[in-house]
């Protein structure tokens, strides 16, 4: 059922309460998600984005209950990824000649995914589309936010920015608006979304935010493609993005480890104790790679000024869980953070040196040589871990 969001603009998307993994199994979505699609019914009828493939038939059926599909004059595809363009093949069966407005890169992604030669109309930043009744759509390319094909669309007079993925969250809600949902959940899902999806593009985002601000467009609503529509102080999320895009960190140190026989786990706990003793104000968190969600841990890394990584030595190397997570950290291209390694060993003991090398390669400033501990940490080794934590706290 369509829901009015302002004047002749309606939400026609899908709330997916069951979604727990996204991008295949790469991203955890503990609170589901939404695929927001919008219908503008001015002199011209415009559909902005659709929904994910599994909901395509349902989407087209619901849309057909609201309007004659043939009444759709224009389709705007802000981004070609399947969670937004997925219903196009089902929809275009009914209206195959309807013009699709999108970026040049979106034509590539849509053709590449659906192998259809639809009526594409390429747009660039600043291009306008008259939709009647004195209103226009203005297109803004959002290249690499987060795909090369991404763009946003601005509706004049109603002052709505349809931002697609930018400013979204994976957060299933029926209430639609940012002021009606749990603010703590909203913030947590927004920062997790930024940390896991947008961090690698922070430098591009900084420029794009300046560009959007310099366009001087009044923005009453930011209608994202996932989660809430920002209607109460919509610029609050733009300001947050500006903060997050500038090498964000809080006064937090996060210790992330895996362990075989709990020796490295014991070191993690003693290092945390040492950090807290040296600086009771710093937030210290410990995350076990065997027990924690990787995307939640990446969010903690995003918030941290220092990350302490631990692995025992196995096969002259580190545990594959630790190697996998450090690889994940490298992909995120974090800037301005420090790292330190630690781990137990029984024989050769290469893990700490390997961790430090990998974290340096991931762009982190390494604190010291790291902490190696032979066999299971005894009282002296535990004291050394406390001292190591103290050193990390003041580094
Ligand atoms: Fe929500 Fe990039 O798709």
Image (cartoon, rainbow, N blue to C red):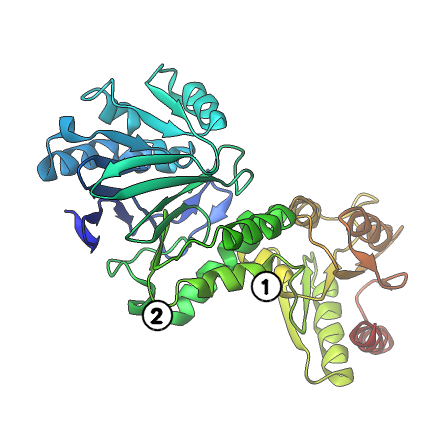
The residue under the point 60% across, 56% down is: 298
Vertical comparison of 354 with 246: above or below: above
Residue 78 circle label: none
Residue 293 shows in this picture: no
**Relative to 98, is 390 above or below?**
below
The residue lying furthest to the front in this view is 134
**Residue 79 at x, y percent in the picture:** 42, 35
Quadrant in which the C terminus appears: bottom right
Badge 2 residue CB within 8 Å of ligand 1: no
Q: Is 177 displayed left or right of 325 in the figure?
A: left
Residue behind mark 1: 243
Q: Quadrant of residue 320?
A: top right
Q: Position of residue 219 (x, y in %)?
A: 38, 57
**Position of 180 compared to 30: left or right?**
left
Where disc 2 sits, the SS reads loop
Q: Earlier in the sequence, mark 2 or mark 1?
A: 2
**Which quarter of the picture shows residue 337?**
bottom right
- Measuring from the top left, give residue 124's x and y in whole percent: 47, 32
**Position of 122 relative to 240 (above/below):** above
User: What residue is shown at x 43% (from left), y 30% (from top)?
Assistant: 123
Left-right relation of 297 to 362: left
Which residue corresponds to mark 2? 182
């Amino acid at each position: 059922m369509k829901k009015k969001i302002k004047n002749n603009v309606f939400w026609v998307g899908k709330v997916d309460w069951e979604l727990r993994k996204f991008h295949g199994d790469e991203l955890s979505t503990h609170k589901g998600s939404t695929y927001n699609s919008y219908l503008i019914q001015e002199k011209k009828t415009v559909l902005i984005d659709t929904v994910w493939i599994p909901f395509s038939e349902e989407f087209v059926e619901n849309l057909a209950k609201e309007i004659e599909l043939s009444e759709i004059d224009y389709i705007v595809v802000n981004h070609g990824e399947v969670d937004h363009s997925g219903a196009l093949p089902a929809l275009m069966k009914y209206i195959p000649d309807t013009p699709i407005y999108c970026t040049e890169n979106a034509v590539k992604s849509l053709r590449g995914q659906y192998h259809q030669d639809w009526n594409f109309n390429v747009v660039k930043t600043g291009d306008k589309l008259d939709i009647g009744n004195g209103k226009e759509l203005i297109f803004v390319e959002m290249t690499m936010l987060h795909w090369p094909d991404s763009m946003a669309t601005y509706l004049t007079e109603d002052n709505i920015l349809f931002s697609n993925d930018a400013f979204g969250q994976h957060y299933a809600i029926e209430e639609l608006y940012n002021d009606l949902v749990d603010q703590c959940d909203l913030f947590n899902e927004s920062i997790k979304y930024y940390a896991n999806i947008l961090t690698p593009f922070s430098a591009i985002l900084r420029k794009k935010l300046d560009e959007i601000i310099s366009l001087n467009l009044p923005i009453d609503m930011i209608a994202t493609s996932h989660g809430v529509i920002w209607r109460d102080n919509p610029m609050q999320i733009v300001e947050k993005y500006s903060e997050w895009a500038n090498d964000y960190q809080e006064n937090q140190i996060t210790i992330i480890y895996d362990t075989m026989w709990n020796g490295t786990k014991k070191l993690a706990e003693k290092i945390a104790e040492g950090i807290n003793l040296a600086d009771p104000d710093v937030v210290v968190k410990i995350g076990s790679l065997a027990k924690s969600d990787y995307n939640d841990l990446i969010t903690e890394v995003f918030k941290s000024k220092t990350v302490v990584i631990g692995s025992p030595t196995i096969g002259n190397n580190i545990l594959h869980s630790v190697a996998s997570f450090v690889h994940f950290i490298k992909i995120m291209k974090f800037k301005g953070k420090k790292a330190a390694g630690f781990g137990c060993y029984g024989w050769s003991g290469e893990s700490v040196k390997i961790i430090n090398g990998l974290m340096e390669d991931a762009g982190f400033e390494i604190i010291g040589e790291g902490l190696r501990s032979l066999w299971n940490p005894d009282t002296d080794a535990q004291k050394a871990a406390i001292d190591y934590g103290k050193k990390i706290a003041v580094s």
